[in-house]
Amino acid sequence: MIRINLVDDEALIRAGLAALINAENDMQVTGQAADGADVPDLVQRTRPDLVLMDVRMPRLDGIQATRTLNTRPHPPRVIVLTTFDNDDYVWGALRAGATAFLLKRTPPEEILAAIRIAHRGDTLLFPTALRHLAATQPAAPTPAARAVATLTERESQTLTLIAQGLTNAEIAQRLFLGVETVKTHVSHILAKLGARDRTQAVIAAYDSGLIRPNTHP
């Protein structure tokens, strides 16, 4: 059973998501909050696997709430929710450790699929959306971004293809490698960057300048 917390200042949004999620056999809503300031206590009490987090809230936004969660041991995965696909807050939330973002207008079946994908530990990459967001943001010399310089040439190639949304099998085909070799490269990339998942590695790649949003295919 996937345990989920809902954090959004709009009660109607929370009610709709709760009805959608609780109708599924493999997931349930274990807690709700209307503001990011309430997230640490909520998560401590309910121990969710995943948090669906609004980015814009009145007292504490989803960026700070996500950053706070990721300073604690074994944090839940966070999918941030936004109204606009060019929301500056989204990039901040991804930098703070969110696994992915979804538009609030996303069809219900896609929201459910995203929850299951994130829970499995896979990453929801939206290459075009990430590229558009990155184009509006200045590079940031984060520890992960600085660590990009330590990647080997093959690891850098692999990370660039990850940013294009390719799977391990597709990367293997593109680089003429075995899938297990690609998995090893991905593991080394995450370890060197201190990244929790592929999304965080891609954010570091943009922040380091390895990938430039205006020229990335």
Image (spheres, rainbow, N blue to C red):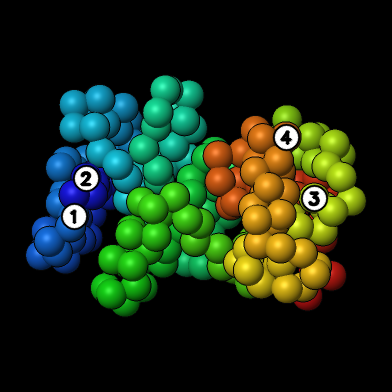
| 1 vs 3, front mark | 3
The residue tagged with tag 2: helix, strand or loop? strand
Residue nearer the viewer, 158 or 39: 158
Cα–Cα span, label 1 and label 2: 6 Å
Cα–Cα span, label 1 and label 3: 36 Å
Circle on res. 155: 3
Does the CB distance between marks 3 and 4 fall below 8 Å? yes
Determine whether, in the image, residue 62 is placed left or right of residue 204: left
Does the CB distance between marks 1 and 3 fall below 8 Å? no
* Residue 208 quadrant: top right
The residue depicted at 42 percent of the width and 22 percent of the height is 72
Does the CB distance between marks 1 and 2 fall below 8 Å? yes
Cα–Cα span, label 3 and label 2: 34 Å
Determine whether, in the image, residue 71 is placed left or right of residue 180: left
The residue tagged with tag 3: helix, strand or loop? helix
| Residue, disc 4 | 192
Circle on res. 158: none
| 2 vs 4, front mark | 4
> Which amino acid is tagged 2?
Arg
Q: Earlier in the sequence, mark 4 or mark 1?
A: 1
Q: Earlier in the sequence, mark 1 or mark 3?
A: 1
The residue depicted at 47 percent of the width and 30 percent of the height is 70
Cα–Cα span, label 4 and label 1: 33 Å
> Which amino acid is tagged 4?
Lys
| Residue, disc 1 | 27
> Which amino acid is tagged 3?
Glu
